[in-house]
């Protein structure tokens, strides 16, 4: 019967147990808080962090430079292409016709100048002939005037000689006026540098350039994205075809709150973790500069806080961070990937408005269009030689 009796409740012991448990929980919370404080002090005290950060890069849009119909597409999305590689071919029929027309116009312009030069020379010789006749008539007139005093020449002969002299003088003036008009068109210039010929040359160069640009080439090396062009498309100049993304020239665009930006300066170290690869892979970089305005300032419809009730919203400033080139080569990234980015602001030296951005990347210049007019001058020279006197 003693074994079945309930145990005696001891309130003091229960209170002591509860007190020990509360003390343990309190101590655990305190130690956790101290550990987190120590961790923050050692790891995050001199850092500002944002997850509103993305990988950015050059998106180079390839557009048509002349009208035509697509006859061949030589690149597809995800493929990497080299600078100068032909990506799209146009038929070039319209460009070829225009080139033929401008060649004919140049030939016509050269022949017109040759004709004007010949006409100017003809008028010059006609004026010389009339001047010789005028000199002869004036000699006769002088003799007639001397003979008229003795009555050896009739008044009719004298009058006819005078009329002939006036007629020749008027004819010479007419020829010289016409000669002046022709010479005004020539402007003392040769065939090669005459304005009409130069104008025809310019049109031919443009037509030659349009004909050459029927083959659309990659201005830089990179990977193809957003291909829109299809075989058979009838395109006008300026139509977008595809985009080329150089994956070796990327950076981070991190949008920090205005309350975090005070200590950010160009040159500070940054660490980037890309969401696609987890926390184990860390990219390192350097702050290059801070955009000179918040996103709302550059919006299509900027906010106007003076037109109604005002609600304060923390603005963000975009910070550009250059990535380490070696890390990019070892672990490539793609523009648009989300990142967790933090900047070490321990040393806040330098000007906020300074920038270390350089324009040395291949996406800032190309030379694939430098030799597009090769052959145009030789063609012009051939047309000029074929249409001028030898």
Image: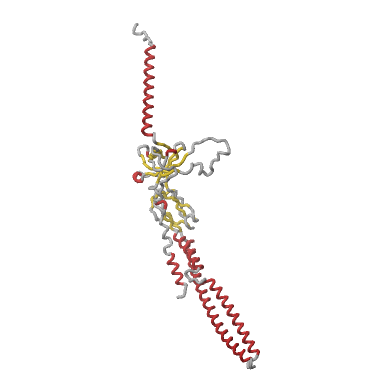
Q: Position of residue 223 (x, y in %)?
A: 40, 49
Residue 368, by quadrant, is: bottom left
Judging from the image, the colouring scheme is secondary structure
Q: How many marks?
A: 0
Q: Nearer the viewer, residue 236 or 319?
A: 319
Relative to residue 268, is residue 213 depicted above or below?
below
Looking at the image, the residue that sits furthest to the right is: 155
> Residue at position x 57%, y 75% from top?
178
Q: Position of residue 361 (x, y in %)?
A: 39, 50
Q: Is residue 233 left or right of residue 19?
A: right
Looking at the image, the residue that sits furthest to the top is: 1
Q: Nearer the viewer, residue 281 or 307?
A: 307
Task: Examine the rendering and report whether any part of residue 234 can be seen.
Answer: no
Q: Position of residue 360 (x, y in %)?
A: 39, 51
Q: Is residue 98 left or right of residue 282?
A: right
Relative to residue 187, is residue 32 depicted above or below?
above
Question: Which part of the image, by quadrant, shows the C terminus?
Answer: bottom left
Q: Nearer the viewer, residue 332 or 117?
A: 117
Residue 304, by quadrant, is: top right
Q: Position of residue 230 (x, y in %)?
A: 46, 53
Relative to residue 5, is residue 376 depicted above or below?
below
Q: Nearer the viewer, residue 136 or 8?
A: 136
Question: Which part of the image, by quadrant, shows the N terminus?
Answer: top left
Residue 17, by quadrant, is: top left
Task: Examine the rendering and report whether any part of residue 384 can be seen.
Answer: yes
């Amino acid at each position: 019967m003693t074994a079945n009796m309930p145990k005696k409740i001891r309130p003091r012991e229960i209170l002591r147990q509860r007190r020990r448990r509360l003390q343990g929980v309190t101590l655990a919370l305190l130690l956790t808080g101290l550990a987190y404080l120590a961790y923050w002090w050692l790891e995050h005290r001199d850092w500002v962090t944002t997850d509103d950060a993305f990988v950015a890069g050059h998106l180079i849009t390839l557009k048509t430079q002349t009208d035509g119909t697509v006859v061949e597409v030589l690149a597809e999305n995800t493929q990497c292409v080299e600078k100068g590689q032909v990506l799209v071919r146009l038929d070039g029929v319209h460009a070829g016709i225009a080139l033929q027309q401008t060649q004919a116009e140049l030939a016509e312009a050269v022949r017109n100048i040759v004709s004007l030069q010949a006409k100017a020379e003809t008028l010059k010789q006609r004026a010389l002939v009339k001047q010789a006749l005028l000199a002869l008539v004036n000699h006769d007139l002088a003799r007639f005037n001397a003979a008229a005093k003795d009555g050896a020449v009739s008044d009719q002969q004298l009058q006819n000689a005078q009329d002939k002299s006036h007629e020749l003088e008027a004819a010479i003036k007419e020829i010289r006026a016409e000669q002046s008009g022709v010479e005004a068109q020539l402007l003392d210039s040769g065939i090669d540098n005459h304005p009409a010929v130069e104008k025809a040359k310019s049109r031919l160069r443009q037509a030659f350039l349009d004909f050459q640009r029927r083959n659309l080439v990659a201005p830089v090396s990179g990977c193809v994205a957003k291909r829109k062009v299809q075989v058979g498309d009838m395109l006008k100049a300026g139509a977008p075809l595809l985009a080329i993304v150089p994956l070796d020239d990327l950076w981070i665009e991190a949008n920090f709150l205005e309350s975090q930006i005070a200590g950010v300066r160009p040159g500070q170290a940054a660490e980037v973790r890309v969401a696609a690869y987890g926390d184990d892979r860390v990219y390192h970089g350097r702050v290059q500069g801070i955009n000179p305005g918040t996103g709302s300032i550059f919006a299509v419809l900027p906010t106007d806080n003076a037109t109604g009730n005002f609600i304060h919203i923390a603005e963000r400033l975009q910070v550009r961070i250059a990535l380490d080139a070696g890390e990019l080569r070892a672990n490539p990234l793609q523009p648009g990937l989300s990142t967790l980015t933090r900047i070490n602001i321990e040393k806040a030296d330098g000007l906020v408005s300074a920038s270390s951005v350089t324009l040395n990347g291949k996406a800032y210049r190309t030379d694939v269009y430098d030799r597009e007019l090769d052959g145009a001058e030789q063609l012009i020279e051939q047309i000029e030689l074929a249409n001028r006197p030898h």
